[in-house]
Image (tube, coloured by chain):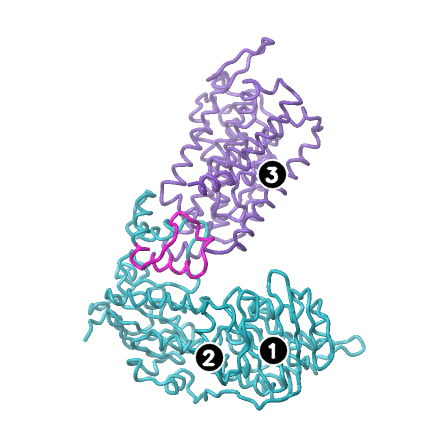
Chain colours: A purple, B cyan
Amino acid sequence: MKDRIKRGLATNEMIVVYIILALCILIGIVNPAFASASTVVSLLRSMLVTLIFAAFEMMVIISGGIDVSFPAVASFAMYATAMIMNGAGLNSIVLAFIIAIVIGMLFGFLNSVLVARLGIPPLIATLGVSSVANGATLAFLGSKEINKLPESFGNLSKVFIYEYVGESGITYQLTALILIPVVIYIGLWILLKYTMLGRGIYAVGGDKNAARIAGFRVVFIQSFVYILAGALAGVGGVTYMILMRQAHPQVLMGTEMMVIAAVVMGGTRITGGHGSISGTILGVTLIALIQNNLIMLGVPTYAQTFVVGLLIVVGTSITSLRTKKIQNSVKI
Amino acid sequence: MDKIFLKLENIKKTFGGVQALKSVGLEIRAGEIHCLAGENGCGKSTLIKVISGAHDPTAGSIYIEGEKIEKLTPIDSIRKGIQVIYQDFAVFPNLTVAENIAMNHALLTGTKAMNWKKSRELAIQAMEQIGAHMDPDVLVERLSIANKQMVAICRAIINDAKLLILDEPTTALTQKEVSMLNTIIRNLKDKGMAIVIVNHKLDEIYEIADRLTILRNGENVATGPIGEFDRKRFIKCMTGRDVEEVYYRPEDSREVILKVENLTRKGSFEQVSFDLKKGEVLGITGLLGSGRGELGDALFGIAPAGEGKITLNGKEVTIRSIEDAMKARIAYVPEDRLTQGLFLDCSIQENTVAASIQKYLKKGRLNYKEMYEATQNWIQKIGCNAKSPKPLIRTLSGGNAQKMVIAKWLNTNPALLVLNGPTVGVDIGSKADIHKILRELAEQGVGIIVISDDVSELIQNCSKILIMKNGKTAGSISSRELDETKLSRLLTSEEETV
């Protein structure tokens, strides 16, 4: 039992928790105003879209792959949805999500054909699809931001599930859109933990050949993963558009590094086979905390990219060192 | 007479124009341990793939429990109770023991949901059946090879296996683990399971088999109860020629080639001393982790020793790097031929001259003609069956490739040749050839050290055997005083010195 507690305190998740706590204390000392509900609200708001992206990125990495095309896919889905809705004069939120999901799935399907059927390395395949999607947005859809969006979008962005008036009279409001990642994470948790399909994702990431011999349909599982990732990228794009009240063809580009950093920091092994929901949420929290608050610690904005890069390097090093340690440890 | 579980008649299989199986028959009875033996490339793996449904035979018929099977697919084969445990076990390193064991069952029954509690119960039940003790919640990547194999066996038996096929199950196991595996296999046999073991190690086959089928070049050469095969007939059937099992016992010599004193590398081995006299073949053995491999690596400067003195042919040499070792004319055939011994995607010629390329550099240019001739020369001299020096080395079988690794080092004209596991994954015919080469070299005055855990190899070839335990020399024994059982007992005994 003692052993179990000891092991529990040394998991990847717990290490991230320690870093988060240390960082919070540090920021709290420098800026006492940090310890307030407003921090939580603004943190959650800034995490919202990243959480959606990190969810499926974790799933893709567990399956032994990687998807760097999602910012481009999400941008395309966001921009195209806005154009279609405006062009046809539609106003339904549900319809907007459906359009974005279908668009995302098409790109996901393209990824899945390249990776699962043609056997192209996932990084190269999705890098190519990323370029295709982003290029298509700029070439065929447009390059200007769209600020006039259907009314229902604006209405939804004004629905809050929690409001808080600060001492200085400023109101902090938590948007209801936060429910989207919550639903996604619950769904993904059930999928990964309690279905054979989900265990198949882990199995394929652990050893593709063994999965084939065991009787998993490897191509199907890989295809499922990339298509679901595409669909959720679409959801992420529309969510971002509603949250920011504008559609922009470029604004999400470049977020893949941060999302992958968050996933890897959360203990998902970049080589596949390992990863957990709780770890990913913690990883996203850590990255968001750094992005939101480094400025308070006197770190200039342009140094943030540097810090995030450093985090990726350190995070991946820690995981690969741990893997190595397990490989070299005395076997039982 | 026992019930016949599986019967194959006149199985033929061709790939392109190549006949992998020419007309093979096989009869497996319930409750027997049947060994399938044969050299590399004899068609063993193809035959297993036919039984597991992975390959469709070109001709022939398959009967399972008396019923003729028209077309056997992998899933049919599993449903009929046939389970194959491959050499790499095909387990998932990232999943727990319980999940690994229960997964195939869930896939077979077609459940869509994952039931953790039931998985755990199934796994514990299976482990109890074979007497394995593992924490069901631990990840498989943390298990030893022997325990990974246990996971694979558990996984096979919970699917109501009636025939269990093990493909070279002992390759990576220590002697102790092999005997544990044998106990488990005998238990399963007593429960009425038919077991097929693919192997080519004679001693292990005699230890466990009830009946034996030998394949050669895609045909079965002989089949029958193990009692009908003495070693001589067995080897003759496997190789198609008479291979003499000779014992190398040279006359005592006084001339010392190599003297090693108090060699130490922290964490690997301590205070190792031995000497090697002219004409001798020295064997170094010990269990995995005893430091035997590290000692070889140290002599060649891969992981050099920190302290100690090495004297080669009367001259003290300091070995801090591979370069130092090569300068001292030491050559090393490494343990893992595929990753350390060969450039797989280079030709036989390029591999052969790789360690001695300097010799062919004349006025800044490589003399290809000389390299070609030298390679051709070695191919003949060492008895490799390559047609020319041109083909890629990966086209050679394990035994022939190993011969070329040795040729590569002989081409450097070494004073001392250290071989780590010289015949791992090498068939009996080539094994005998390699042993013959080593003896001849020893007679010519080259110092030969064989690091191995193959007991019969050591007894046959080495005049003196150094036993290592926990990084220390536990003793050195003249092989005149040893036989195979005595040596294996010494190896596995708990005592620190022998």
Near-viewer residue (B254 or A99): B254
- Height in image: B101 above or below B468? above
Q: Which secondary structure, mark 1?
A: loop
Q: Mark 1 points at which residue?
A: B390
Q: What chain does badge 1 belong to?
A: B
Mark 1 surroundings: few (<14), some (14-19) or many (≥20) residues within 10 A = some
Q: In this view, does B414 lie to the left or right of B189?
A: right
Q: Which mark is residue A257?
A: 3
- Height in image: B425 above or below A47? below
Q: What chain does badge 3 belong to?
A: A
**Distance Cα–Cα, label 2 vs label 3:** 57 Å
For discs 2 and 1, the disc positioned in front in the rendered view:
2
**What count of labels does the image hold?**
3
Identified by mark 2, the residue type is Ser
Q: Mark 2 points at which residue?
A: B456
Q: In this view, does B193 lie to the left or right of B342?
A: left
Near-viewer residue (A305 or B496): B496
* Farthest right residue in view: B363
- Height in image: B90 above or below A253? below
Near-viewer residue (B432 or B296): B296
Query: Residue A63 location, x and y as percent?
Result: 47, 47
Q: What stretch is highlighted in magenta?
A: B126-154
Near-viewer residue (A314 or A72): A314
Query: Residue A132 location, x and y as percent?
Result: 57, 42
